[in-house]
Amino acid sequence: MRSTLVSINLVFVLLSFVSFAKADISNDFESLGSNKKLVKRAKAYNSNRKVRIVQRRTVDRNWRLEFGVTGGLVAGGNAYLETEHIGGLIDLHITPRVSIGARYNENYNSLTAEGKDVFTRANTARVQNNNFDVPDVDVPLNTTLAVISFYPLYGKVNMFDMGVAQFDVYGLAGYGQTKLESGTSPTITAGGGIGLWLAQHFSARFELRWENYQDKVFTGSRDLNLTTASASIGFML
């Protein structure tokens, strides 16, 4: 009997405590309006305010040296030639916004379908002792350029859920020379690309450049405008 009475008393005590706690919480919320400072702050809060967040670059490029191996294709220029190239690049990143460097391409040339047809007809005419014209082709052997690059835009990209890489969209301009069978010619270039900074010491680039130089044919010198596309893998010190 005594245990039953004790249990009943404990239940009443617990119920009284819960009711008291609820009353305190309710009173606290109702009293919020009397706190003038809190009300003033709540009214001043603008729920439509937009906050711009720019993440810091994950790969430091202050006074970093980048070396790369490149390969790509050349479009335009001599209609009788198609050119592929391999080479290298070096860039000194002064800041994440600016770098200076060099590009070198060793060219591998072959005749286009049109070029093969023209030379075949010329050889056939020569064998038959007929008059024939041989097209004059001044083959580009290699190109060396000094460049300066600007990186105005950057962001991050998910690499197939394997990690997040930082990238920069950049523009560049440069000057150098192209070595041809006839000699060398001053060369100017301009273009841009995307640089991927895969880790602190590894990089990749996709670059598209316009190039201009002069070759020499029977009729004299002529301007050539080419488009060079290249991809590279690099290492950063």
Image (cartoon, grey):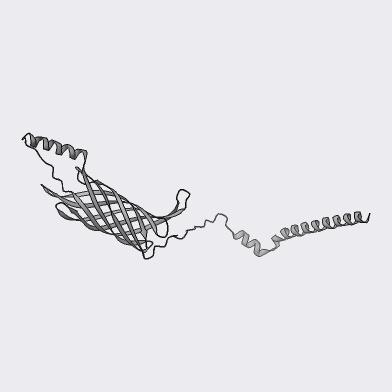
Q: Residue at x 22, y 52 (%)?
A: 212
Q: Residue at x 11, y 35 (%)?
A: 124
Image location (x, y in percent) of residue 132 = 8, 38
Image location (x, y in percent) of residue 21 = 77, 58
Residue placed furthest toward the left: 129
Image quadrant where one finds the N terminus: bottom right
Depth check: give the residue in front, 40 or 163: 163
Image vertical order of residue 181 relative to residue 128, above or below: below
- Image-quadrant location for residue 190: bottom left
Image location (x, y in percent) of residue 118 = 15, 38
Depth check: give the residue in front, 147 or 54: 147
Left or right side of 134 for 53:
right
Left or right side of 157 for 210:
left
Residue placed furthest toward the top: 128
- All told, the count of numbered labels is 0
Q: Residue at x 29, y 56 (%)?
A: 88
Left or right side of 72 for 18:
right
Image vertical order of residue 180 relative to residue 114, above or below: below
Image location (x, y in percent) of residue 201 = 40, 60
Q: Residue at x 62, y 59 (%)?
A: 43
Image quadrant where one finds the C terminus: bottom left
Depth check: give the residue in front, 26 or 17: 17
